[in-house]
Amino acid sequence: MKTEFSLAQLADPDIAEADKILRACVHCGFCTATCPTYVLLGDELDSPRGRIYLIKEMLEKNRPPTQEVVKHIDRCLSCLACMTTCPSGVNYMHLVDQARARIEKDYTRPLTERALRAVLAWVLPRPGLFRLSMMLARFGRPLAALLPGSEAGSVSPTLSRRIKAMLALAPRSLPAPGAAGGSVFPSLGPRRGRVALLQGCAQQVLAPRINQAAINVLTRHGIEVVLVKDEQCCGALTHHLGRDGDALARARANISVWLKEAEQDGLDAILVTTSGCGTVIKDYGFMLREDRDFAGPAAKVSALAKDITEYLSGIDLRRQQQQHGDIVVAYHSACSLQHGQKITQAPKELLSKNGFVVKDVPESHLCCGSAGTYNILQPDIASRLRDRKVANIATVKPDMIAAGNIGCMVQIAGGTSVPVVHTIELLDWATGGPRPGLS
């Protein structure tokens, strides 16, 4: 794609990066076939190619984002299926991230939308506040039915529809909090390694059992696990809302505490059980590439970050005698894992080797509609994607659904009665832990 940035514009490292990305695009349109919003809506501007044109126009002419541009960028899930499909290697992720930051800086949204986004950006990264908000949401759930829904076929959600979606996602009860930051879990038997385990934000409130299952599996196989004190949200939530100042501040804080832990007691890896977080942490090196003080440390952290299944693939897991060959597991490949981190086979191979019957889901490349805060901000599109995903899962007649991302788990569980569990919970069960999905 031809670009016409001025030399003055290209002096900005972000614009120089955008120019490189745009020039790689050859207009082939392969991305449209795997883009969830284009598949649903059939609008070229709701495809990666269409959004690339909108972003190019906005950046090249240095114009404030228009309402039309914002509408179509907001509808992007950042599922990154287009990057898997693209034969030219266009880094759409870094381009759309830049567009979101520009929108956040230069576009004035309606007051109610600004308020909602501000609440999400403030509450979700703070587990204490998020827990409180989930408790309060239980009182609001009965009122959700009284709120007006969307008209048939609508993809422009109202505030009431977004609030309704938010209340619907709130659980009826919350589990007890998991282990606190600063906790260390020694290996059972001779120590073979030492890792930090990302505590997460929403996950530690909604499903602390996931990290507990990871701790069980790791310590059972000789790996010491530390929950690093003073760790913060990874920054993914605010990063995808275009609030890069907040996201980068969180990234720097985490880099500091993780590398301090690595220097003091050693770390073989920083393990992540929420793939949406993992994709962003692995991108810290790029995000902070122009930061004189943090560029090197950020690259080190990105190199240390691994998805839990990525790490366990290098360990010979000891399966218990009990067989699970009668358990059919539909494996949902989270977008952030398959497209963002290119991890596709490891989770399925781990499950198969440990006795489960693993079934691929038709249209596995299409997003379930969770995508961070997308199922709140774009609930109508998200609901359609969830229903499509659940219908595809149903065709394999599973006993359980496995996924590697808490957002996907919550989203899919909202449309099915089949237990939705984390891959690590099944691996914990297979190696001596409790059967998941019973609570």
Image (cartoon, rainbow, N blue to C red):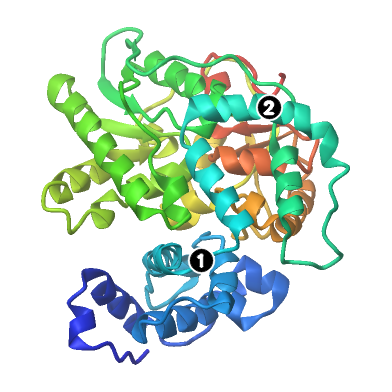
Label 1: which residue?
Answer: 108
- 139 or 235, which lies in front? 139
Q: Is residue 430 left or right of residue 229?
A: right
| Residue 206 horizontal/vertical position (percent) | 59, 27
Picture quadrant of residue 331: top right
At 47% across and 43% down in the image, what residue appears? 275
Q: Which mark is residue 136?
A: 2
User: Going 49% across and 62% down the picture, which residue do you hit?
Assistant: 80
SS label for mark 1: loop
- Mark closer to the chain start, 2 or 1: 1
Using residue 197 as the reference point, say whether residue 35 is left or right of it: right
Q: Residue at x 16, y 43 (%)?
A: 297
Task: Inspect the image, locate mark 2, and give the three-letter code of the amino acid beneath it.
Answer: Leu
Residue 222, by quadrant, is top left
Is residue 410 at least partly visible in the picture?
yes
Residue drawn at point x = 26 percent, y = 57 percent: 286
200 to 61, vertically: above or below: above
Query: Tag 2, which secondary structure?
Result: helix
| Between 68 and 204, the one nearer to me in the picture | 68
Q: Nearer the viewer, residue 265 or 322?
A: 265
Residue found farthest to the top: 189
Residue 423 appears in which quarter of the rendering?
top right
Q: Which quadrant does the C terminus fall into? A: top right
Q: Tell me where residue 217 appears, x and y as whole percent.
A: 45, 20
Label 1 Cα neighbours within 10 Å, binned few <14 / some 14-19 / many ≥20: some
Horizontal side of 113 relative to 7 (left or right) equals: right
Q: Position of residue 21 (x, y in %)?
A: 33, 76
Q: Alpha-carbon neighbours of circle 2 within 10 Å: few (<14), some, or many (≥20)?
A: few
